[in-house]
């Protein structure tokens, strides 16, 4: 029997026994006494008895990095950071990156490391830890790069500003100017932009000074690796050419990447 139904049955039985006791007491008891007995019995089985205890919230832990090595020679290592509006743990999104573009990169000889991460600013440390581990194990098998989509691309750029040993960053649809994004979202009627802007203010602040440590536009001078920026969403087909040629830092508006310093 469900616990709630069991409590209702107990209440009904107690009330029934109480009423039977009052009726059988006869004329020896006063009306006032019988009323008081019924009242005490009802208070003894008060409503909180009926309310089930709330279940504690269970937060899924961050998944361990998924790592796959190519069958032949290792061309390099690609660390992949999933999207998700900085909301943190998303093992499903992590697996999607392993499928695409992970399988495409694997076929080209890349070691694939798809990682999960914590919510908000705490997620950056997960990326730095994974990148540090891959840099430490490097034995001359090509570059170590970070690929990220949307918020994952944003965190990849921030990680590159703090870990200069990274060789390249590929960011798809990453917001590269948080302050500008928030301004445009405030003037827009697109609810999706407002949701993303809310997440930005929630995790990175509302002023330029608060955003600065997390704003790729402000960190551009400290991002030393080669950077390839893609606008829009991932589509079918290969995302990366066999030998990426784009180089440069994200500009203020994140409208283009550059090819050896020339507008693309």
Image (spheres, rainbow, N blue to C red):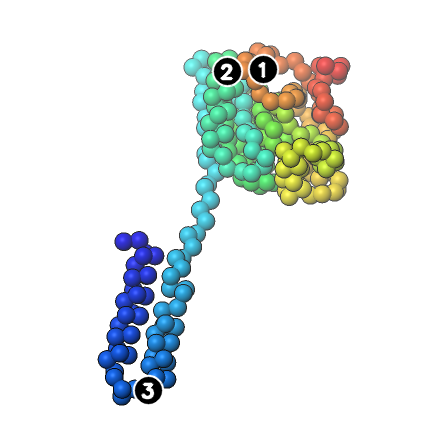
Where is mark 2, residue-wise? 104
* Nearer-N-terminus badge (3/1): 3
Where is mark 1, residue-wise? 240
Please, what secondary structure does the residue beneath circle 2 have?
helix
Please, what secondary structure does the residue beneath circle 3 have?
loop
Residue 157 coordinates in the image, percent (x, y): 64, 29
Give the residue drawn at x 42%, y 52%.
55
Question: Callout 2: few (<14), some (14-19), or many (20+) C-alpha neighbours within 10 Å?
Answer: some
As measured in the structure, the alpha-carbon distance from the residue carrying label 2 to the one carrying label 3 is 88 Å
Query: In this view of the protein, which residue sits in the foreground, 122 or 233?
Result: 233
Could you say which disc has been placed on residue 152 in the image?
none
Could you say which disc has been placed on residue 30 in the image?
3
Would residue 252 be seen by someone viewing this image from the given angle?
yes
Q: Residue furthest top?
A: 242
Query: In this view of the protein, which residue sits in the foreground, 192 or 100?
Result: 192
The nearer-to-camera label among 3 and 1 is 3
Relative height, residue 14 to residue 79 (above, below): below
Residue 64 coordinates in the image, percent (x, y): 45, 34
As measured in the structure, the alpha-carbon distance from the residue carrying label 1 to the one carrying label 2 is 9 Å
Question: Callout 3: few (<14), some (14-19), or many (20+) C-alpha neighbours within 10 Å?
Answer: few
Would residue 163 be seen by someone viewing this image from the given angle?
no
Q: Quadrant of residue 79?
A: top right
């Amino acid at each position: 029997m469900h616990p709630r139904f069991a409590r209702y049955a107990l209440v009904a039985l107690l009330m029934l026994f109480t009423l039977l006791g009052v009726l059988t007491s006869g004329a020896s008891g006063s009306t006032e006494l019988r009323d008081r007995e019924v009242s005490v019995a009802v208070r003894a089985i008060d409503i909180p008895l009926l309310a089930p205890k709330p279940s504690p919230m269970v937060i899924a832990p961050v998944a361990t990095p998924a790592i796959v090595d190519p069958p032949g020679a290792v061309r390099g290592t690609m660390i992949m950071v999933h999207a998700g509006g900085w909301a943190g743990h998303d093992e499903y999104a992590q697996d999607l990156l392993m499928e695409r573009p992970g399988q495409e990169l694997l076929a080209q000889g890349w070691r694939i490391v798809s990682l999960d991460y914590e919510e908000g600013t705490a997620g950056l440390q997960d990326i730095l830890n994974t990148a540090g581990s891959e840099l430490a194990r490097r034995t001359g098998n090509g570059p170590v790069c970070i690929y990220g989509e949307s918020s994952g691309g944003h965190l990849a750029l921030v990680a590159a500003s703090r870990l200069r040993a990274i060789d390249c960053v590929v960011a798809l649809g990453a917001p590269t100017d948080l302050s500008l994004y928030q301004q445009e979202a405030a003037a827009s009627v697109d609810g999706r932009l407002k949701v993303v802007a809310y997440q930005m203010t929630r995790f990175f602040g509302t002023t330029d000074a608060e955003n600065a440590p997390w704003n790729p536009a402000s960190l551009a001078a400290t991002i030393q690796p080669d950077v390839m920026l893609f606008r829009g969403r991932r589509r079918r087909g290969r995302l990366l050419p066999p030998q990426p040629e784009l180089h440069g830092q994200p500009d203020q508006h994140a409208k283009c990447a550059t090819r050896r310093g020339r507008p693309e």
